[in-house]
Image (cartoon, grey):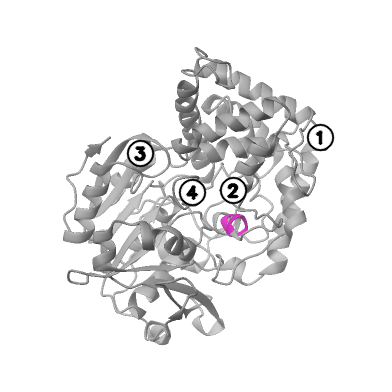
Amino acid sequence: MHTRRTTRRFRTAACLLAAAALLVSGCSSGSTSSTASSAAEEKGAAPTALPRSTPAALMSYYEQKPSWRDCGVPGFQCATVKAPLDYDAPSAGDVRLALARKKATGPGKRLGSLLVNPGGPGGSAVGYLQAYAGIGYPAEVRARYDMVAVDPRGVARSEPVECLDGPGMDAYTRTDVTPDDARETDALVAAYRKFAEGCGADAPKLLRHVSTVEAARDMDIVRAVLGDKKLNYVGASYGTFLGATYAGLFPSRTGRLVLDGAMDPSLSARQLNLEQTAGFETAFTAFAKDCGRRDDCPLGGRGTGPEQAGKNLKAFFADLDARPIPTGDADGRRLTESLATIGVIAAMYDEGAWQRLREALTAAKQNDGAGLLALADSYYERDADGGYANLMFANAAVNCLDLPAAFDSPDEVRAALPDFEEASPVFGESFAWMALNCAYWPVRATGEPQRIEAKGAAPIVVVGTTRDPATPYRWAEALAGQLSSARLLTHEGDGHTAYGRGSDCIDSTINAYLLRGTPPADGKRCS
């Protein structure tokens, strides 16, 4: 739910639940597979820890010796390891997982490997490592740890799921997600169906085995082949769900875990979407307050309050719904309501993007949609040649396997609209309709909402930001309340996630934990 640091950092591919236009949390309902059953015996139950001993059928995976090679990126090495496609039937085939590492630089005693994951689901951990974590994490952390990343199955370099070509995605991202009548509703449903059919045609077997539980089990194989007795890990956004799932399955192998921008695994897809909708309203209110202090605020000028700014933005979206505006795009794309909405959403992840958003909105009022289109393209990871990264495809594939559907039909969405619009007068209608996509997914969901307690795990640091749009602060409180060994660390501020975003208090606290194993006092707060 998705995803991200948009300007000052390599984007963390934030959680992308309701926020990912047309690609949201909530998947087709269905029976739970045996793989998922091994993690949760019943809805709401804690995951059952797997046996400490490695099953004989998996030993060949755990005993792999990766062959490291040059990545083409100075200072980094890459390798490939295998994992079983289906953990319940290891002989049914393999999945190839892409790894990258940057070895500890010293000085100081090496502390092992530190895996990183930027979130998504669908964010490339390898790309994140090479573009940011391997060079931008604190020098003292990089000195003591081998910085390591593995792209989860179905993501980026690890047998990526593909669903639509560039022109197809262009059409998909322009689809109206606030349908006004039956014709527009049918067009939205048709877009969801076409997207889902494309994913199913591309990876009919893999699509059944890209769940978070399976990705967490893959991480244990990676831990073993790296030679580490315990997993040390920093996960952001969706990466917190992945890390918490690992802790639930392998509590005795859990080392120093930092879960930054935490998700609440006990919530249903509909509740996740609804609470994230409220999170974006909180972030927009902060943006609008800042905007209203400026003479050139494009949402009403100096003195405009957040409520009126929201109404002005909604009116702007409505105008685009009727009359898309030019962008100067080489492919002739115009700025539609759906693309503009995503452009605004993209800027909510990082307060450092607020100036860019103000400039883009100002230009759009003058009939130039290029700025908002660029923000939307950045969010969707569309390149200058019109191609799309795998992020949005993998995002849907994982979300639609992890939880039963948020909605099963347009009628259910319409019935829920009042709740979503109460949560966010600005984004509620769009987010509600975006949550319909997994109703048409070709694979039945295998997961269920569940509490994760990870009894017996070492101390785990859960980090929450009070005005985080994508992973609301309440989720960090909830996850910390579930994990038996959690220490909640609070960042009082804006934006998505906290580590490495300018708070010396947050950074020094997490560094002390990673380097010395000293967790913060539960409830510590930083600004």
Q: Secondary structure at mark 4?
A: loop
Task: Pick the residue in front: 414 or 489.
Answer: 489
Task: Pick the residue in front: 282 or 183.
Answer: 282
Q: Which mark is residue 465?
A: 3
Q: Is the C-beta separation of discs 3 and 4 under 8 Å?
A: no
Task: Pick the residue in front: 293 or 19.
Answer: 293
Q: Along the horizontal axis of the image, is 387 left or right of 150? A: right
Which segment did they paint magenta? 391-395
Q: Tag 1 or tag 4, which sits nearer the N-term?
A: 4
Determine the residue located farthest toward the right in the rendered image: 183
Query: Which residue does the numbered mark 2 point to in the structure image?
Result: 378
> How far apart in space, not on screen, are marks 2 and 3 (Cα)?
23 Å
Residue 257 shown in magenta: no
Q: Secondary structure at mark 2?
A: helix
Residue 394 shown in magenta: yes
Q: Tag 3 or tag 1, which sits nearer the N-term?
A: 1
- Tell me the residue at 62%/65% (across/down): 161
Main secondary structure of the magenta stretch: helix
Q: Tell me the kind of residue under disc 3.
A: Thr
> How far apart in space, not on screen, are marks 3 and 4 (Cα)?
14 Å
> How far apart in space, not on screen, are marks 4 and 1 (Cα)?
32 Å
- Tell me the residue at 57%/24% (across/down): 425
Q: Tell me the kind of residue under disc 1.
A: Ala
Q: Which mark is residue 182?
A: 1
Query: Which residue does the numbered mark 4 point to in the structure image?
Result: 14
Q: Which mark is residue 442?
A: none
Q: Is the C-beta separation of discs 1 and 3 under 8 Å?
A: no
Q: Tag 2 or tag 1, which sits nearer the N-term?
A: 1
Q: Is residue 407 visible?
A: no
Of the two numbered discs 2 and 4 in the rendering, the one whose residue sits closer to the viewer: 2
> How far apart in space, not on screen, are marks 1 and 3 (Cα)?
40 Å
| Location of residue 291 with respect to 127 vertically, above or below | above
